[in-house]
Amino acid sequence: MYDVRVLSQYPFFKELMKREERFVFHDSLTGLISRPYMMEYIHSLIRENTPFTLAIIDLDNFKDINDHYGHRTGDDVLTGVAESLREYFGDCGLIGRFGGDEFLAVYTKGNDYDELHEFFDGMFIKNEKLPDPIFRKRLMVKNAMPYITATIGTCSFPDNATNFDWLFSLMDKALYRGKSKGRNCFVIYVPEKHDKLTITSLANHYLYDIFRRIEDIFEMDGDVSEKLVNAVEIIESTLGFSNILWIDPKGEMKDVVKGNVVGTFENISELMENGRYAATDFQHLSKHNPALYECLMRMDMSSILIMQVGKDGRNGYLVVCPEVRTLHIWQDNECATIYMLSMMLDWAFRNKE
């Protein structure tokens, strides 16, 4: 919890404490600054033309933690992450509870891109300041150890935006860019990269359109392999994957677009649960399928989704890898798209027989 000594360093809160009890500033669960006072604080910085960087920190798949471990454990995760964030920011700024599983952070030590990158990257990796990172780790809370990751979007005042609404809209855009990349990352708003993006497009609300386009491809005459290449081009351009590979029934894996063989594997079916396998931690893979593990390491991949084609993989498997060295968290829309592709492939193979 923020104490009087810390809050007194900030003119806005120092003045408020002359009129208000300090406890009214705090979120009741986490002890961070409550949302109303965090908003007032941000408005005060803009009025005074004080440079700062605003960040929204969204815990990934937090609903799954509540559903799997219970809401009490979910509350423990929120309080644990909140305390880690408060300690990490220290005198670099303030952290507030935005609502649910989201936090607002105000970084006040400058808007230099390289410094911001180093600071936010420090939440995800071990470093001198933080031997135990806040995210990309299992958090011990009572009798559970859920894996905690987050997606962060940032935007700077006045460098990127000069008023409150504009600032929040660009911060949201950066957050959704992070989510569209697979979450578990941070995005610093850069006009050259992000100006033309829209939240609507980043939110990937176009499953229906993708499904129809894939269906149209497989209903046309032509070779199954050619249809697969055309479908993959749609998925890669829409979801941003860098590699979609194909393991045929004999265990030979090829790059779908380039056609080159990248490896030969056995016992892929042993990895599958309900027809798919998704992982961002390859420890299990290294033990149970070392050949596939070595291939992924050689290709510099750090996340994988495998979807069987046909019952028990009778027509092979689709292997999907996102951007190189991205610790991708697989999202429902992505899994649904690859599942749809596997269903259409199976249909095409059975019609070919």
Image: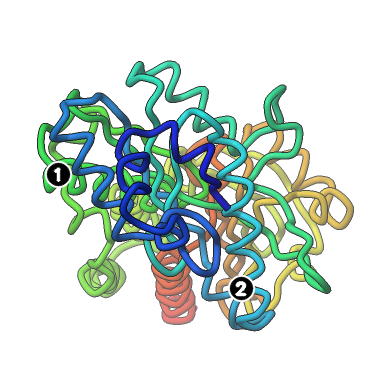
Q: Is residue 180 visible?
A: yes
Badge 2 element: helix
In the image, what residue occupies the spot 10% across and 38% down? 163
Q: Residues within 10 Å of mark 1 (few under 14, many from 20)?
A: some
Which residue carries the number 1 mark? Answer: 164
Q: Of residues 84 and 274, which is closer to you in this image?
A: 84
Q: Position of residue 271 (x, y in %)?
A: 76, 67
Frontmost of labels 2 and 1 is 1
Q: Image quarter for residue 147?
A: bottom right
Mark nearer the N terminus (2 vs 1): 2
Residue projecting furthest to the right = 287
Distance of mark 2 from mark 1, alpha carbons?
A: 31 Å
Badge 1 element: helix
In the image, what residue occupies the spot 79% across and 53% down? 285
Q: Position of residue 336 (x, y in %)?
A: 43, 72
Q: Amino acid at mark 2?
A: Gly
Which residue carries the number 2 mark? Answer: 74
50 with respect to 154 (left or right): left
In the image, what residue occupies the spot 57% across and 75% down? 64
